Amino acid sequence: MPNTPDIKWLDSGEPYSEQFQDYYFSTDGGLAETEYVFLKQNGFPQRFIQSDGHQKTTSIKIGETGFGTGLNFLVTLYHWLHTPKPKKPVHYIAVEKYPFSKVQLSRIYTLFSEQWPQLNKPCRVLLNVWPDSLRLQSVFEYSFFEQHFKLTLLSGDAQQELSNLLPEHKQSFDAWYLDGFAPARNPDMWQLSLFNSLYQLSKPGTTLSTFTAAGFVRRGLINAGFTINKVPGLGKKREIISGIYKGL
């Protein structure tokens, strides 16, 4: 059976998670938050630029826990598309236990295109290939723009799916977007075992960021092996977390 989320539609048009009693995004500053929390803290879009002037180099691998509406993916794709050539290819690997159906996503992307017209093309590109629904423990994979931007979406429990990436993807990720619902709403996404998997999948120089500044999340990431900093937040959010794995 499909594993679509249980949501209600707010008067603003935004989807609200009934299961986690939390918002997926906000039309009031949601795009700016993604750019600040996830792209800026991980050094994008600057890291997309080829430093050696050649196009055939190793791709950048971005991991995300909590794909949700795909907003972080869409914004990342938008900035990659607007990065001057030559630019690095990207492999974006995300985990989502409750992926939206195509009908649900179409409704959300209509709102995205109205609120943030610059996302119109990324929304169309993804929606055109999105399956009607995704089953639990299934994989959706598609390569865009002459296979230079690849999406792999793993539908399942984040900890289990990250463990399944080992050993094939061990020490190969360049950046992490940690974007599950708030820890108080969805504690399973913020466990030490998950942080340890992030560590094993990271290499020296791998960065990460998240909207939460919860003390146990910060301590857990430090215990897993990351160097963590508290960073000024955006808008009403006082602080967020960014980090790096510096190696042994």
Image: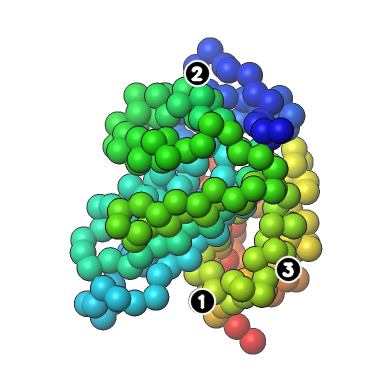
Residue 138 visible in this rendered orientation of the protein:
yes
Q: Label 3 amino acid?
A: Asn
Screen quadrant of the N terminus: top right
Residue picked out by circle 1: 205
Which dot marks residue 13?
A: 2
Kindly identify which numbered label has been placed on residue 196: 3
Q: Looking at the image, is mark 2 or mark 3 earlier in the sequence?
A: 2
Numbered disc 3: secondary structure: helix
Judge left or right: residue 64 versus residue 142.
Answer: right
Q: Amino acid at mark 2?
A: Gly
Task: Looking at this view, name the residue that lies furthest to the top.
Answer: 11
In the image, residue 44 lies at what x, y percent?
A: 38, 60
Q: Earlier in the sequence, mark 3 or mark 1?
A: 3
* Circle 2/circle 3 CB separation < 8 Å: no
Residue 10 image position (x, y, % from top left): 57, 16
Please state the horizontal and vertical placement of residue 158, each as a whole percent of the image. 70, 53
